[in-house]
Amino acid sequence: MDFSWIFSYWPLLAAGAVQTVLLLVISVGCGFILAIGLALAQVVGPRWLKLFARGYCTCLRGTPLLIQLWLLYYGVGSLLPMIPGLRASFLWPILREGFFFAAVSFTLNYAAYEAEVLRGALLAVPKGELEAGRSFGMSSSTLFRRIWLPRAIRIALPTIAGEVVLQLKATPLAFTVTVMDLYAVAYKVRQDTLLVYEPLMVVTVFYVCLTLIITRAFKIVEAQVPVRR
Amino acid sequence: MSSSQSLLELLSPYPPGWGGVLLAGALSTVLISLGAYLVGIAIGLAGAIGKLKGNRPVRFVLDLYTTAIRAIPELILIIGLYYAGTDGLNRILAVLGLPAVEINGFVAAVAVLGIVQGAYMTEVFRGAILAIPVGQIEAAAAFGMRPSLRFRRIVLPALMPNALPGLANLWMCVTKDSALIAVVGYQELALATRIAAGNTKHYFLFFLASAALYLAITLISNVVFSALETRFRRGQPKTA
């Protein structure tokens, strides 16, 4: 075991860790908002919207994230330069990066899984609570914002914690599209120093710690709402 | 050359087209997944019995195994096990004075994914065994069945309906995790797609095609698992 390389590589490792966390935060944050829409579409939407949302979830849950990532990065990425003027525009520095494609595909993928969880949770909210809100004269948007959604999120919270951890475990895939996340840094260390296990161990420790932090944080959030059992 | 070919020609299963490569990749994806799944079931059953019946050190080791595997990202596990596994095996062989072996990519992929699946399976089976009404097992013991017979005739059929939803989920996971094997360079659907796309520069077409193949695998598996579930639940009371 030789960990002396850490001293020369720690700035890179720190930058990689930031990239990993950033990917996680972006995909979970944006994905969750998208998932609310998708779940709502499946529960109360008109028929065509229901079908669209169901199809979206089936397709994204039925294909590997790696393929979705490559489809976006290589597929859409190879079509983008054909759009006239895009290469010269201010958007190009962002659209050129693997990070952008990784963030988009992780977000879309997370949204599909999360929408299924939320759909179940929306249906699990006791009907009486919604009727109570309605009888107070709440408009349907207020009812959704104040009662339906918060209750559904509370019901789904343990599952959401699990989904976030799963999403965290998916982030190293970004290294296949040239994102310098923590795993990519470990890969580079391996190539530079020919050490196989030590960099992987450092990455593993980081992921396990992050998992513990996430589960602990969700426990604290869960404890905020008093539940009578 | 690529621009002159039509999309259908590109996807045709015969050599100028890449459809054959993709289908072969899909077949090896299914085979890897099946192999890993069976290895996982074997590890999972053994692990679940060990966790429920084993002594303290056995339980500790199994706890460590399931916790570690479930906490570490799949990609890191696969790469770690792939390199560490082949390297470790050769070191053991060297200690024993045997020549080093080149490990077949298929075997390595099945072993690595099987070890990962085994950890999840252990938990699924443990829960499923715990959900069997204890009276059924006691009845079998009271009739004088030996533990192995009791396991085969009572525990195994009784745990299957409980375990099936979890097993179905794990099958979906392993078909998708097998795409990660592409990263270590064994040719299955994901890598075949990448090669086809890279050669023809029709990235969009080929990735969509392979996504469709994966989706087909998923949808067919869904049908199979719901058929299995009705079969295993026959004779059980239906709850509304």
Image: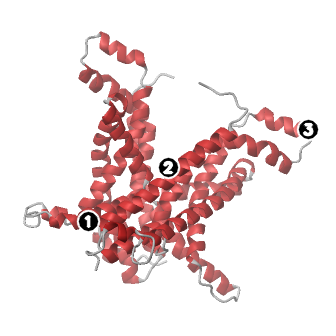
Q: A22 or A173, which is in the foreground?
A: A173
Question: From what the image shows, is residue B123 above or below residue A65?
Answer: above
Residue B136 in the image, given as x and y percentages of width and height: 80, 35
Query: In the rendered image, is residue A14 in sight?
Result: no
Between marks 1 and 2 in the image, the one whose residue lies nearer the viewer: 2
Residue B189 in the image, given as x and y percentages of width and height: 46, 67
Residue A15 in the image, given as x and y percentages of width and height: 27, 65
Question: From what the image shows, is residue A133 above or below residue B217?
Answer: above
Report the colour scheme: secondary structure
Q: A57 or A26, which is in the foreground?
A: A57
Q: Which tag, 3 or 2, sits closer to the chain's start?
A: 3
Circle 3: is it few (<14), some (14-19), or many (20+) Cα within 10 Å? few
Q: Does residue B136 appear to the left or right of A198 in the view shown? A: right
Residue B192 in the image, given as x and y percentages of width and height: 43, 71
Q: Residue at x 38, y 71 (%)?
A: B194
Q: Secondary structure at mark 3?
A: loop
Q: Secondary structure at mark 1?
A: helix
Residue placed under numbered mark 2 in the picture: B219
Q: Quadrant of residue B182?
A: bottom left
Circle 1: is it few (<14), some (14-19), or many (20+) Cα within 10 Å? many
Asked if labels 1 and 2 share a chain, the reply is no
Query: In the rendered image, is residue B40 in sight?
Result: yes
- Amino acid type at image mark 3: Phe
- Which quarter of the rendering shows the N terminus of chain B? bottom left
- Amino acid type at image mark 1: Gly
Q: Residue at x 25, y 15 (%)?
A: A138
Q: Do tag 1 and tag 2 residues touch (Cβ < 8 Å)?
A: no
- Indicate the chain on which mark 2 is placed: B
